[in-house]
Image: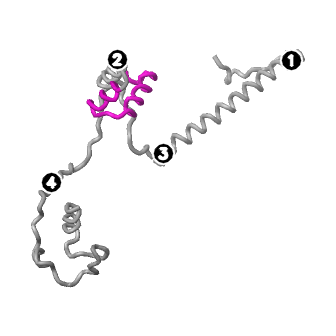
Amino acid sequence: MAGRAQVMALQDPGGGVGEGGEGPRSGAFPPSSTPPTEVAPRPWPVAVVEVPAKAQRRRYTAAFKRQILEAADQCETPGDVGALLRREGLYASNLHRWRKLREQGGLEGTAPPDRGPETSTNTPMARRLHDLQRDHAKLKRKLKQAEAIIALQKKVSEILGLTLAIPESDEIS
């Protein structure tokens, strides 16, 4: 019980409400503490934490991914895959994603898709391209309709026994 009292004394050296019925603290400092103008030295070492300027995304080559997948496939006993992942500093989600990529044939040295925002489609050149593509589709529909009408006219002329006059300037070679 003496250990607990010492810990409590270190945490609250002035005594507080609920500790032995002493009542609230008085304005005076205990003789072992320092006046408020001085800073007491810490009895423990200060931890030095170095934070890197910017975290770097880890990138793995296709060869490394294949190597890890082969090693994971060779694991036989429970816990071997976990030990492999811990040793290499990887997550199970990496292994899962790489297995799916291997099934799709994506580990043949191809680069991953580009990251970042999509390119803007609101540029004048992109709008012009969109307009031209729309016009092209419209003209294709009209051509298909015209060809259907011409085919119908040919069938009607054959049934009626009429010959159609073909102008020489519009002749298709």
The local secondary structure at tag 1 comes to: loop
Q: Distance of mark 4 from mark 1, alpha carbons?
A: 100 Å
Which amino acid, by three-letter code, is at mark 2? Gln
Residue 162 point in image, percent of width and height: 86, 17
- N-terminal of the pair, mark 3 or mark 1, is 3
- N-terminal of the pair, mark 3 or mark 4, is 4
Q: What's the coloring here?
A: one colour
Which amino acid, by three-letter code, is at mark 4? Val
116 and 55: which is toward the camera: 55
Which amino acid, by three-letter code, is at mark 1? Leu
Closer to viewer: mark 1 or mark 2: 2
- N-terminal of the pair, mark 1 or mark 2, is 2
The local secondary structure at tag 4 comes to: loop
Q: Which mark is residue 121?
A: 3
Residue at point 31% right, 33% down? 90
- N-terminal of the pair, mark 3 or mark 2, is 2
Residue at point 45% right, 46% down? 120
Q: Which mark is residue 48?
A: 4
Q: Is residue 149 above or below residue 26?
A: above
Residue 52 point in image, percent of width and height: 21, 49
Q: Is residue 47 above or below residue 112?
A: below
Q: Are marks 1 and 2 in contact (CB under 8 Å)?
A: no
Total marks shown come to 4
- Magenta highlight range: 79-108
Which amino acid, by three-letter code, is at mark 3? Thr
Q: Distance of mark 2 from mark 4, alpha carbons?
A: 42 Å
Closer to viewer: mark 4 or mark 1: 4
Residue at point 55% right, 39% down? 132
The local secondary structure at tag 2 comes to: helix
What residue did someone put label 1 on? Answer: 162
